[in-house]
Image: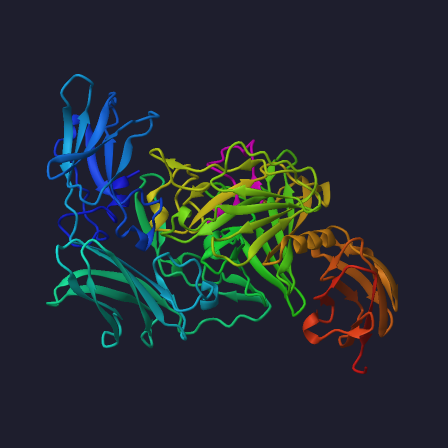
């Protein structure tokens, strides 16, 4: 890993007036001694982040060469005008740790690495002077109000970029720290490059050694362009530029108009290029996002009245995820071939390797006021796009309440082993996981009301046990108001693996597994450490996996058929179904939803008959054949019947009246599409539902 590129963005440099402008780190004069001293603001993957780095303590980073064996008695002497103020022990353990950071007081101007042995004079190893800049500064920009990027037609825009809709303005936050001996008058100005005549400015006087932060609010975007840069400058009283920054800006001139509830084919916008690594040479290049796939392929967005968005994105190889309000996502995984691997497989065998979408396809099967059905079909491929004949179809059924089902049908060679479930957070480019992943990320909620909280970084060992079905609640972001839900009524047991955090040179840098090889980026195999692509591509954070610990399938069978390569052979066809959703419902409500999904109510009907398969868990639907214009359905819930769904065969198209225990339901309490009836009510005791078909009352 080339750490210097990471730190070039934040190190202090005497040659510039800003701590955030790229510059080479300050090094000791004698690197041949085996030790080097650099100065920075701390590991960039660790807090503080963004504006909070301005004015944070300077760190002296002592690095040892790879073959240097650290001796006992090392300490770093921090000095002020030649006088030692502190001397901090420097220890390199365990062996793989090659550097150590030590916070320095603001007035320290030199550090000396010593070998200090009792009864002997100090032995100086190396020293470095610390020349702090006269001015530290940074700026960030955000829209004046929070809007899901998907609602502006964008997906996972890089952190640090500005995304604005046509009715939004920009707020620019600026942090400064001056080290001059006298108060410093400055003027802070922000404007868009395409609208230089329209600026926001603020004058301020920065007191020496005091951190100053302010906001410039209400900057309108230029008209007629969809991308620009936001310019931010700090000048002194004479007009001399002290600092400047350019922030990329994406402007949504004509944002999409999603239905309140429905599935829509679209081309989601991503303005940065796709990072490409040549596996043979390791060299990086890039390709245009707009030209990365066949031109006829589209993304699919499922929209809900709650504001939830579920996305099938070309950049994620069509692997779907909840796209959160705070520019993160949550994915439930896919059918991934596990060990033993197919012969000659290179890296993992899974649909995320299908970067070019040679095999993956998505289709809107149904989108009505009552139900959305989207189908994703794929083959698991290896790093070199090889496939072996197995294939999968995932059907997603959604209802207006923000809940749905994931139905996986997998056709595979009899000896193949697959994993089906892993909870994975997606983050945008330039996002450090510790800045967005909440400490309290996952709850396991038992159906009797007990709860286990998973914390990340996860304490080891994990003592969670589950022999009964459990509802999992997953938080997408520290500030996200809604949580993703995952439940299987046939119980897969506890997660097989809760992913541990990554360390970089002895410092904890992620809350769980982190990878830059998916989504979007191409040419990287599965990795097990952080890398520079954090600034180049969206990344993923794996929280927990069930591996080959699969729930009991709803159906399974060994049948003679054709595999995905057209070969005639016996294949196993398995099917599973999970309850999924994005909701702000409390724990008790989630338990009721799970119980309702797992066990349908008893029914007594008149004017209709029950179908042979009268409850289809895959669609959480009760099925009836209509025989009369007036239908009466008596429901007897076992515990709760939450937002029931009815599939009504041979029903007239017009449904004129719906009553529950004699009370008419308002139009917003149900949805009807001529075949599917969804009720937005919760029934916890015996009740009578009456349906009147036809145009009359």
- Is 629 positioned to the left or the right of 95 in the image? right
Q: Is residue 141 visible?
A: yes
Residue drawn where x is 63% and y is 37% of the image: 549
Q: How is the image coloured?
A: rainbow
Looking at the image, the residue that sits furthest to the top is: 119
Q: Considering depth in this image, is 306 or 154 the residue closer to the camera?
A: 306
**Residue 11, percent from left and from top:** 23, 46
Left or right: 22, with 405 as reference point? left
The residue furthest right is 606
Residue displayed at 43% across by 63% down:
154
Q: Of all residues shown, which one is farthest toward the bottom?
A: 696
Whole-percent x, y for residue 653 in the image: 75, 75
User: Which secondary structure type mostly characterizes the magenta part of the structure?
Assistant: loop
Observer able to see residue 334: no
Q: Does 345 lie within the magenta span? A: yes
Residue 384 image offset from top left, x and y in percent: 45, 41
Q: With respect to residue 544, does 473 lie above or below? A: below
Residue numbers of the magenta segment: 333-357
x and y percentages locating residue 75 in the rendered image: 22, 28
From this view, report whether residue 27 is shown above or below residue 601: above
- Determine the residue positioned at 79% across, 66% down: 649
Is 269 positioned to the left or the right of 656 in the image?
left
Give the quarter of the figure containing the N terminus: top left
Determine the image quadrant of residue 156.
Answer: bottom left
């Amino acid at each position: 890993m080339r750490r210097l590129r990471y730190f070039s963005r934040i190190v202090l440099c005497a040659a510039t007036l800003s701590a955030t402008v790229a510059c080479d780190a300050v090094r000791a004069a004698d690197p041949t001694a085996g030790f080097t001293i650099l100065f920075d603001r701390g590991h960039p993957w660790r807090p503080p982040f963004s504006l909070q780095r301005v004015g944070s303590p300077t760190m002296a980073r002592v690095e040892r060469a790879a073959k240097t064996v650290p001796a006992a008695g090392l300490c770093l002497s921090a000095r002020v005008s030649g006088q030692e103020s502190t001397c901090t022990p420097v220890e390199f353990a365990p062996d793989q740790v090659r550097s150590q950071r030590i916070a320095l007081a603001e007035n320290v101007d030199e550090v000396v690495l010593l070998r200090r042995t009792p009864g002997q004079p100090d032995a100086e190893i190396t020293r470095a002077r610390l020349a702090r800049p006269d001015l530290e500064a940074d700026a960030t920009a955000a829209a004046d109000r929070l809007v899901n990027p998907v609602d502006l037609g964008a997906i996972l825009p890089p952190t640090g970029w500005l995304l604005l809709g046509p009715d939004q303005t920009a707020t620019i936050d600026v942090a400064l720290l001056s080290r001059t001996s006298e108060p410093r008058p400055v003027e802070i100005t922000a404007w868009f490059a395409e609208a230089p005549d329209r600026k926001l400015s603020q004058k301020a006087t920065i007191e020496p050694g005091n951190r100053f932060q302010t906001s410039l609010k209400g900057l309108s975007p230029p008209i007629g362009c969809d991308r620009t840069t936001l310019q931010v400058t700090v000048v002194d009283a004479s007009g001399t530029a002290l600092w400047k920054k350019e922030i990329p800006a994406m402007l949504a001139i004509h944002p999409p108009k999603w239905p309140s509830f429905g599935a829509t084919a679209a081309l989601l916008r991503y303005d940065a290029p796709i990072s490409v690594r040549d596996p043979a040479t390791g060299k990086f290049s890039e390709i245009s996002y707009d030209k990365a796939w066949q031109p006829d392929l589209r993304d699919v967005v499922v929209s809900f009245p709650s504001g939830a968005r579920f996305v099938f994105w070309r950049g994620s190889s069509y692997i779907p995820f909840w796209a959160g309000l705070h520019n993160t996502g949550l994915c439930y995984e896919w059918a991934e071939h596990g060990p033993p691997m197919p012969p000659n497989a290179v890296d993992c065998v899974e649909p995320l390797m299908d970067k070019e979408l040679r095999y993956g396809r998505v289709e809107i099967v149904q989108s009505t006021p009552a139900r959305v059905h989207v189908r994703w079909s794929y083959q698991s491929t290896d790093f070199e796009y090889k496939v072996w004949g197995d294939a999968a179809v995932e059907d997603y059924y959604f209802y207006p309440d923000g809940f749905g089902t994931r139905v996986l049908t997998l056709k595979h060679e009899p000896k193949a082993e697959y994993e089906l479930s892993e909870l994975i957070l997606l983050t945008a480019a330039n996002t450090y996981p510790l800045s967005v992943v909440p400490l309290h990320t996952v709850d396991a909620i038992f159906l009797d009301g007990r709860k286990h909280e998973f914390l990340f970084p996860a304490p080891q060992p994990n003592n969670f046990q589950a022999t009964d079905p459990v509802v999992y609640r997953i938080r997408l972001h520290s500030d996200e108001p809604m949580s993703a839900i995952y439940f299987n009524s046939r119980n897969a047991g506890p997660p097989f693996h809760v992913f541990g955090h990554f360390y970089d040179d002895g410092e904890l840098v992620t809350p769980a597994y982190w990878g830059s090889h998916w989504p979007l980026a191409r040419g990287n195999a599965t990795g097990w450490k952080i890398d520079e692509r954090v600034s180049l591509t969206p990344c993923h954070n794996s929280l927990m996996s069930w591996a080959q610990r699969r729930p009991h399938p709803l159906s399974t069978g060994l049948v003679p058929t054709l595999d995905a390569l057209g070969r005639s052979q016996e294949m196993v066809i398995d099917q599973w179904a999970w309850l999924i959703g994005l909701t702000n419902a409390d724990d008790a409500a989630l338990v009721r939803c799970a119980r309702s999904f797992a066990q349908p109510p008893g029914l007594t009907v008149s004017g209709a008959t029950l179908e042979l398969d009268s409850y289809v868990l895959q669609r959480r639907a009760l099925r009836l054949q209509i025989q009369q214009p007036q239908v009466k359905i008596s429901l007897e819930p076992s515990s709760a019947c939450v937002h029931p769904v009815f599939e009504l065969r041979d029903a007239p198209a017009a449904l004129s009246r719906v009553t529950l225990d004699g009370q008419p339901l308002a139009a917003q309490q149900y949805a009807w599409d001529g075949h599917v009836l969804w009720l937005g009510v919760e029934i916890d005791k015996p009740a009578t539902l009456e349906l009147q078909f036809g145009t009359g009352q």
